[in-house]
Image: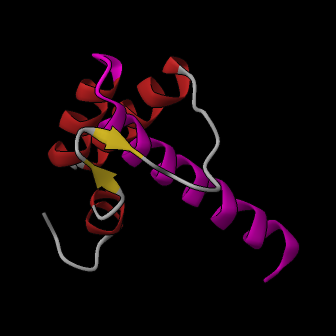
Amino acid sequence: MHPGSRIGRLWDVVVGGSCIVLGMRDVTDAEVESLRTAAGQAGDLEQVAICERALDGDAAARAICADAIVSWEAEQAARRSGS
């Protein structure tokens, strides 16, 4: 785990095997697969492994993927708006 990282912050909300993520939207398998592909192309093997776990039904891993996807979408929206 990387303290202060996106993954570290999300693990802070995982309690007793239940994942509580507020303000997060559900992501589809197709979105997780796209993230896995992009991560693999970028050489981010940790994210690839997280995506694999998410696709296998791991709720905490899915929340991490959702955070990465939503963060990317927000960055893209900010770029489009010139923020």
Task: Please tell me which residue lies in front, 59 or 17.
Answer: 17
Which image quarter holds the C terminus?
Answer: bottom right
**Measuring 32% from the left and 19% from the top, which residue is drawn there?**
57
**Measuring 38% from the left and 43% from the top, which residue is drawn there?**
19
Task: Please tell me which residue lies in front, 18 or 65.
Answer: 18
Task: Please tell me which residue lies in front, 60 or 64.
Answer: 60
For residue 18, side relative to residue 53 (left or right): right
- The image shows residue 17 at horizontal and vertical percentages of 24, 38
Residue 70 part of the magenta segment: yes
Magenta span: 55-83
Q: Residue furthest front?
A: 16
For residue 81, side relative to residue 46 (left or right): right
Q: What secondary structure prevails in the magenta region?
A: helix
**Measuring 77% from the left and 62% from the top, which residue is drawn there?**
77
Snapshot colouring = secondary structure
Residue 80 position by quadrant: bottom right
Q: In this picture, is 83 found above or below 73?
A: below
Q: In this picture, is 19 found above or below 23?
A: above
- The image shows residue 5 at horizontal and vertical percentages of 29, 72
Residue 53 position by quadrant: top left
- The image shows residue 4 at horizontal and vertical percentages of 27, 80
**Measuring 26% from the left and 67% from the top, which residue is drawn there?**
8
For residue 78, side relative to residue 62 (left or right): right
Q: In this picture, is 69 found above or below 12?
A: above
- The image shows residue 43 at horizontal and vertical percentages of 20, 47
Number of marks drawn: 0
Which image quarter holds the N terminus?
Answer: bottom left
